[in-house]
Image: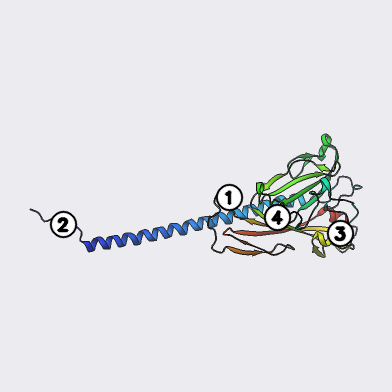
Amino acid sequence: MKKQSGFTLIELMIAGFIGIFIMTGLMNLFITTNKSVTLSDSLSQNQETGRFAMDYLTKFIRRAGYSEDFTNFVPPIYLASGSGTLAITCTGTQADACAINNPTTSPATILGDRLSIPFSVGGNADDVTRSCTGSIVGGTANGPQNLVNVFWVSAETANLRELRCRTFNRDTNDWLDDPVSIINNVERFEFQVGIANSENEKFVSRYVSIDTLQADASININNIRSIRIAILTTSQDELDDKKVQSTNRKRTYNLLDAPVFSIEDSNLRNIFSNTIELPNMIENANI
């Protein structure tokens, strides 16, 4: 009868220990890799959101003050009367069309500022263009139009953290179309206007909020030469709000003239900023 051979208890314990050691290493590698992929995806998402939002806003902000007819004054920004030469009440249907700086009366609808950019289009066949919502404006079919592209970040539950746009018709004193979503995952939107010392100068001497612009009677709206914007993007995952993306849960942010605020979660955020010259206002400067 042959002698049976096998593993001793000590050999089995050693083999089990080695197996546990290897599995622990593989699990740690899997967790680390998963966190790295999550972090990379979040950073990529923030960068993509920021670049797209900046490119989109820049394209339409550069239209500020544009008019086919040089005798038709178009202000670089649409806001309540009290500055410049254009009387605007910003009440009724106009209320949500005017630019506003960090509103406190309706914080449930806006995250940050609301920017309103006026422009004018002609009624000729080659004057056809599109508003920020994609609506066809101007041209022979629509005739000359005085319009305002309005941008804001929504704080409403149905479209939370959406950078939105809507077009206002100054001729009919009513909205041209419904709001559209430009891109998601934008936490805040802020802007300031660059002011020249006089209507004859092309260069900016300082940047101020529109509250300062309206409060200071010595500043004319015609002196606006550029607009500085800043947005805060987020990696918020709507499908998994517990998804760990960072171990640092509380961060403090400061965008331009906005009050400093803190957000406590694990989502990554990035600040993007840009200064946009307004060619129509610069060209109109008489030097």
> Mark 1 or mark 2, which has the lower sequence index?
2
- Kind of residue sitting beneath label 3: Asn
Q: Please state which of residues 36 and 211 is positioned toward the viewer in this rendering.
A: 211
Q: Is residue 43 left or right of residue 272?
A: left
- Kind of residue sitting beneath label 1: Glu
Dot 4 surroundings within 10 Å: few (below 14), some, or many (20 or more)?
Answer: many
Q: Which residue is mark 4?
A: 111
| Alpha carbons under labels 3 and 2: distance apart | 96 Å
Nearest-to-viewer mark from 3 and 2: 2
Q: What residue appears at the point 66 percent right and 49 percent down from the top-left corner?
A: 157
Q: Which residue is mark 1?
A: 238
Mark identifier at residue 183: none
Q: What residue appears at the point 76 percent right and 55 percent down from the top-left corner?
A: 105
Labels 1 and 4 touching (C-beta < 8 A): no
Q: Residue 20 appears in which quarter of the rendering? A: bottom left
> Mark 3 or mark 4, which has the lower sequence index?
4
Residue 37: percent from left, percent from top:
51, 55
Q: Which residue is mark 2?
A: 5
| Alpha carbons under labels 1 and 3: distance apart | 43 Å
Mark identifier at residue 223: 3
- Kind of residue sitting beneath label 4: Leu
Label 3 SS: helix
